Image: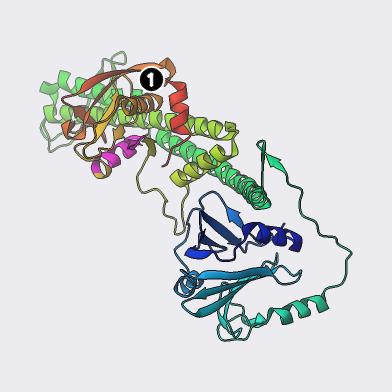
Amino acid sequence: MSLNWKEIDLILSELCLENSSIQKIRQPDFRTLVLDLYKPKRRFSVLISLAQGRTRLHSISKPVKNQVSLQRFAQMLRSRIQGGRIISAEQIGRERIVRVDVQRAGEQTILFLRLWGGAGNVIAADQNFTILDAFYRRPKRGEISGRYFNPRELIEASQARRTEDGRVFEVRPFGKSTGEAVDFNTFIEEEYRRQEEEEELGKLEQKVRSLVERQRRFIEDKLEEIRDSYTPEHEIERSKQIGDILMAHLHEILPKSDRVQFPDFYHGEETVEISLDPSLNGQQNAEKYYQQYRKAHRKNERLREEIANLEQSLQSLKDEGEHLFSIEEPGEKLKAFRSFLDAYQPVKGGENKKTVPGLRFTSGPFTILVGRSAQENDTLLRQYVRGNDYWLHTRDYPGGYVFIKHIAGKSVPLDTLLDAGNLALHYSKGRPSGKAELYYTQVKYLRRAKEGKKGLVIPTHEKNLSVQLDEKRLQHLLGHAKG
């Protein structure tokens, strides 16, 4: 609900804008202007919102985040009235149009703030009422540069279209908050902040639930795909058995044979027909089967690790979701929702908003990166960490890599090391035990394993760290994940 005329009158009487200097003009978003003002012994900011249904004017006590670059109208105001002085500010009749006269270097500018719920606007005119520019340019209303603007005519036209509906406008009840007297400006600021926070929370909650569900389906589909490509162990073992049978009968294999038949001592001396490469001798063909065995065995090991990591990611996603929806304080919940969406939400064009894979956390001034799969671990190692960054990993359990980003001139404090250690344990198979031994070292002391699995490294100069899972520490970290 927008402000009514009585509420606007009360706000203006509390603000006492006359003789205020305009120090700065800001535009936090596409619907809002903020004027930073100064009077002797008093600095304050005034917000002008043109949001539909929430059109309003009031002072603000808390900072407003800039979400857009300075737009055309705000740039014009900076060049025209920033540094000027407000001569007068009053509401015109009962029509929710505020006239603000500003003087700067002998030049007068008139701002008309039309605080109508469905047609709000800010119009800047010179002393002859010629429009200099408008926040929203509306040619059909004549609200464009160079046109004549007379709010009295606008009010008369509006009154002619309006029929009496018997409404009586009153100021919303306001009184005490947290035991202290509150003026109407403060009450209105808190009221609209609460409404906007509730509205944003509702929208974000829907997005988070939808995103959690999409991520869950994605991980489950990936798990199914990997499990389908998993080679049964008996098939892998059979390649080794064929190699053993060939080695037992090397003297019987004729040169350039493409197939042979020998007793299968693994299956009760049944005869087995074995395909051979005629360009290889018997021992080379046996080695070829051994290679198939080793290759399939390594592949299955990689797949098992991928499956373990994906299962861990699925559990972590579930835990993150439960944690997000268990937060009760609206402000904290809002921060947590935004952080979660920043980490996962795709942006226009189909590209992911996060450029760094895995998850990103903060511990004091330090950034902690966590890879949750072999692919994320490998990508972080190759592209996003440097030699002086620290690497942590559980000693006896498979799990994600955790990196602490180096800050020049700063050593990593124990508290940050414990934060990273808890994350390493949380994103590992050792999590159910609640404790684990970790090793850590700088990235420059990691050596890639030759022909090893993707992302596999061997640490040197490593140190040991014993970690016991600290749920309070962990929940604080998970609630502030940045992604």
Q: Position of residue 461 (x, y in %)?
A: 16, 24
Q: Position of residue 335 (x, y in %)?
A: 51, 41
Q: Position of residue 128 (x, y in %)?
A: 60, 86
Is residue 297 something one can see in this rendering?
A: yes
Residue pointed to by mark 1: 430
Q: Is residue 234 magenta?
A: no
Residue sitting farthest toward the front: 40
361, above or below 40, in the image? above
115, above or below 392, in the image? below
Magenta range: 364-382
Please tell me in which quadrant of the rendered image residue 91 appears: bottom right
For the residue pair 34 and 278, the one nearer the viewer reads as: 34
Q: Position of residue 322 (x, y in %)?
A: 55, 31
Residue sitting farthest toward the top: 268
Q: Residue at x 62, y 64 (%)?
A: 50
Mark 1 secondary-structure assignment: loop
**Is 421 positioned to the left or the right of 460 in the image?**
right
Q: Is residue 370 magenta?
A: yes
Q: Residue at x 30, y 24 (%)?
A: 414
313, above or below 418, in the image? below
Report the quarter where the C terminus lies.
top left
Q: Residue at x 58, y 31 (%)?
A: 326
Is residue 311 something one can see in this rendering?
A: no
Q: Amino acid at mark 1?
A: Gly
**Is 447 positioned to the left or the right of 439 in the image?**
left
14, above or below 377, in the image? below
Q: Residue at x 67, y 49 (%)?
A: 183
**Is 298 positioned to the left or the right of 426 in the image?**
left
